Amino acid sequence: MKSPQFKYLILILVIFIAVYSCKKDDDGDENFDHKAQAKTDDTDLIDYLKTHYYIPAEANESFGSIDTIENGETDLYSQVETEAITYNEIEYKQYYFKVEEGIGENPSRFDSVFVKYRGFTLDSVKFDENINFNTTKGWSSLFSVIPGWKYGLPHFKSGINESSQGEPIKFTGTGKGVLFMPSGLAYANVGSSGRISANTSLLFHIELAKIKRVDNDRDGILTMNEDINKDGEVTDDDTDGDKLPNFVDNDDDGDGTLTKDEDANGDGDPTNDDTDGDGIPDYLDKDNS
């Protein structure tokens, strides 16, 4: 049987490989002008949104559809919301259309989500889909997906599982909509396994059913709460300077006491324990006496 320490090290390795691989893929050709491509993509996305409209799903369909405006239909551009995103020091704009916001909770960028989806290029080529909540493929870690998902899914809320034992999984009140993302938040200038060409902007129909809050290092603090500097990322927060970000470090302040054991008041939450009253929680304070 593998030791808990071994399992913990494997967890760290897997997370860092996923994060590093995503960054490496996004870099592609180091001489490529990502800034110029972001502007081109935004022009293309705006043109698409101004010339297309949304057709709601029929009762027996997983998703609605999008078609070219021909008879004065309401364009998508007047209905989408916009998010300005800085990724790898490049400014992008991502657009999202809410069919239904959902009634549950919003995921953070560091959670896992149970989601249906169908992906298209802007010229209507379908390249991927998962339209069945009964498969394990429905779960995705927002750590390991393309950036457009990582930033887009948190705009929607989960639903309620109303499944009965022995029956197909059924959710109500799910978050439904469409994400429109520039290539720099998708597969950038490297493409993807022959399915998607380089510098291709994409759209995804999504239905968010369920979220799973993640505690990567199992230290009692959810990963989404390990963003100490509040910059929206957790990979650059390293309180004890040991080269392990807090979200994969089970002793965040490096004082020899595991973070999960710095719960002085015994409420299961180390973030609200400040023994010496200096305003720094014990789990981030080497000198808390």
Image (tube, grey):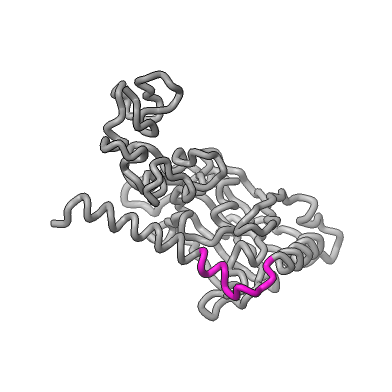
Could you tell me which residue is drawn at 60 percent across and 59 percent down?
A: 88
In the orientation shown, which residue stands out farthest toward the left?
1
- Residue 73 in which image quadrant: bottom right
Camera-nearest residue between 89 and 175? 89
Camera-nearest residue between 242 and 212? 242
* Residue 287, x across and y down, in percent: 34, 28
Horizontal side, residue 129 vs residue 245: left or right: right
* Residue 186, x across and y down, in percent: 59, 65
Confirm whether the magenta stretch covers residue 203.
no
Observer able to see residue 81: yes
Observer able to see residue 209: no
Could you tell me which residue is drawn at 64 percent across and 63 percent down?
A: 203
- Residue 125 in which image quadrant: bottom right
Magenta segment range? 23-34
Check the image and report above or below for 278 versus 119: above
Horizontal side, residue 186 vs residue 244: left or right: right
* Residue 70, x across and y down, in percent: 84, 66
* Residue 178, x across and y down, in percent: 64, 56
Q: Quadrant of the C terminus?
A: top left
Could you tell me which residue is drawn at 58 percent across and 52 percent down?
A: 151
Horizontal side, residue 209 vs residue 219: left or right: right
Camera-nearest residue between 104 and 39? 39
